[in-house]
Image (cartoon, grey):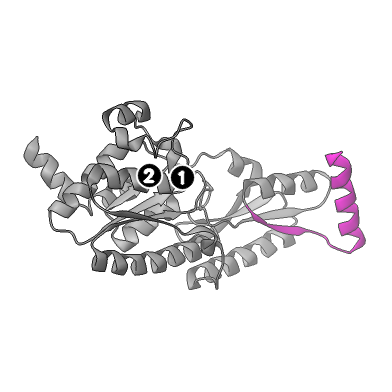
Amino acid sequence: HNLEVQKLAVSNLHDLGIEGLVCIGGDGTYKGAEALTRLGLPTIGVPGTIDNDLAYTDYTIGFDTALNTACECLNKIRETSDSHERASMLTVMGRNCGDIALHTALTCGAEICMIPELPWDIEEVAERVKWGVLRGKRSMILVFAEGALSSLSTDLGKLCQEHEELQDIIHNNGITTSAQVAMIIEKLSGHETRSTVLGYIQRGGAPSGRDRVSAAMMGVRAIDVLKSDASSRVIVERNGRFEDMDIEEALQMKRELDEEMFVACNRIDTSYQYHHKKTT
């Protein structure tokens, strides 16, 4: 059935005089583009997603705009947190990729960042909040990637046994929302912790200058590739240069976390490390 629909789509495009397509999106878009290419319609892929979760390109169109939106919101939350002397946890998008969270945390000087790529323990996070306050911080900023629950390493059953007051927060199906994470941190740290979910505001707004430049350069490269009679290619940005590669090869690449950036981000908060070093 899908093949028949694809054939009809190609036929309609040919009837309209369309000789090739530039498909903007991610892995799913490229798989569709490959299907059209096999049926005789040249296609070129351009990476467009705020998640920045594609392994074959340094940046995707939309990521920088979403990052700037998250940073603007976090700057305002920091001001409120400072005035009320509380911890604030901002949940950002990204699906199973922590790039928005990691870049936001590093850019805005957040004390803690939780991402799906690396395991994290909720008791340690609460301890870091506690000692941040004891060391004199007026506020603690936590950035939480929406997919970070998948990498939570805490034994929740044991946690509830040790802290009966958490049983009203942690239900039978475990932790399902970032708001629950914030409430648990508040209970364990003894410090008021507020949760803010940034949501779909990250997906809208006027594009940043960087995204506009990337989109323009990728568009030019895509047209040049089509004019050369090439097809089933994807445009990539690597080290500031715009190139193209085979779509199938691109889809097989595995994305890796920028661990150097994660280490740099964690070095921002020295209060917990200082206490941990003194007590061990």
Circle on res. 218:
none
Residues 30 and 199: in front is: 199
Crowd rating for badge 2 (residues with CA inside 10 Å; few <14, some 14–19, many 20+): many
Residue 17 lies within the magenta run: yes
Q: Residue at x 46, y 66 (%)?
A: 69
Quadrant containing the C terminus in the rendered view: top left
Q: Report which residue position mark 1 lands on.
A: 177
Q: Give the spatial CA distance, label 2 vs label 1.
A: 7 Å
When asked about the image quadrant of residue 49, the answer is bottom right
Q: Report which residue position mark 2 lands on.
A: 181
What amino acid is labelled 2 in the image? Val
Relative side of 7 to 111, left or right: right
Does residue 200 lie above or below 245 as drawn? below
The segment highlighted magenta reads 1-25
Kind of element beneath mark 1: loop
Tell me if I can see residue 270 in this picture.
no
Residue furthest toward the left?
A: 278
